[in-house]
Image (cartoon, rainbow, N blue to C red):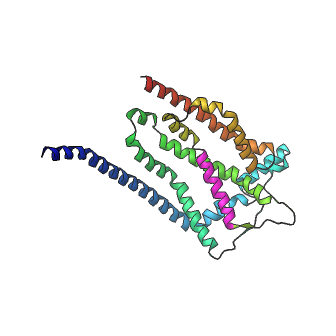
Amino acid sequence: MHEDISNKKENKPEQEKEMSFWEHLEELRMHIFRSLAAILILAIVAFLNKRIIFDYIILAPKDTDFITNRLLCQLGEILSIDALCIGRLNLSIQNINMSGQFMTHLYVSLIAGLIVAAPYVIWELWRFIMPALKQKEKKHSTGAVAVSSLLFLAGVLFAYFLIVPLTINFLGTYQVSQDVPNQINLNSYISTVVSVTIAVGIVFELPIFVFFLTKVGILTPAFMRKNRKIMLVIVLILSAIITPPDVFSQILVCIPLVGLYELSIRISEKVYRQREVELTG
């Protein structure tokens, strides 16, 4: 009898732990469900507004009257840099698959829903993580959702209005020979625009990643300062690939990326000092 009671006492914490795990998993499932529901609803809205999404947003950067193309062309005339004038580019987009346009419509609608719903998705993720944080950590993390959302949307807008037109100009006009004309496939064009936009939006989250990596002790400001030159080389190579072959265009892309890295170092220093005080205190 005594042994049975002892076994029950030993098993009780394990059962509670198991129940706690499943409750935790259920909570995560609900956060994911609400995030997916928000993306789906906004994707339906985007799907119903096909003309706005495609004619005025997705396909706009390839046209001569796109705002970035016009401004860069004007700037190129002022500075006498012909390479900046990408306003003369007019790509002809082709579809070669029977279901290509419909599937592209679905895909772009989902991506649009994801981008617009990003602040809500980040908020749901934050609601899931927040209970695990200590009171001090919650205090220091105030505004994390707003900052993360703004950084992501800033990255998306930066990519759309600057990097995407430069990328389309470079890849759309690049030829290995005059005998090989460019005939751009719809899927290829959409993939380029979407991948560049989403990738830059994620890159702009660098300060947030640095904040949490420094908080858990994986990253230090000393490491970031030590590898500053390597990071600068990586940024320059990336800028050279996606921009026309002139220094000015590369600088336009480099400045925000280098600025984000320097900001991340400052954030890492601040978080590292706070972490040291907490550990020694």
Which residue is located at x 43 percent, y 34 percent?
137
Give residue 152's position: percent from left, percent from top: 57, 47
Give residue 123's position: percent from left, percent from top: 45, 48
Q: Is residue 124 magenta?
A: no
Q: Work out which residue is located at the far top of the displayed protein and give it.
A: 281
Q: Work out which residue is located at the far right of the displayed protein and give it.
A: 178
Give residue 262's position: percent from left, percent from top: 63, 34
User: In the image, 152: left or right of 88?
Assistant: left
In the image, residue 80 above or below residue 274? below
Which residue is located at x 16 percent, y 45 percent?
3
Q: Is residue 188 magenta?
A: yes
Q: Nearer the viewer, residue 224 or 96?
A: 224
In the image, residue 197 above or below residue 208? below
| Region in magenta | 186-204
Which residue is located at x 20 percent, y 44 percent?
9
The main secondary structure of the magenta stretch is helix
User: In the image, 149: left or right of 183?
Assistant: left
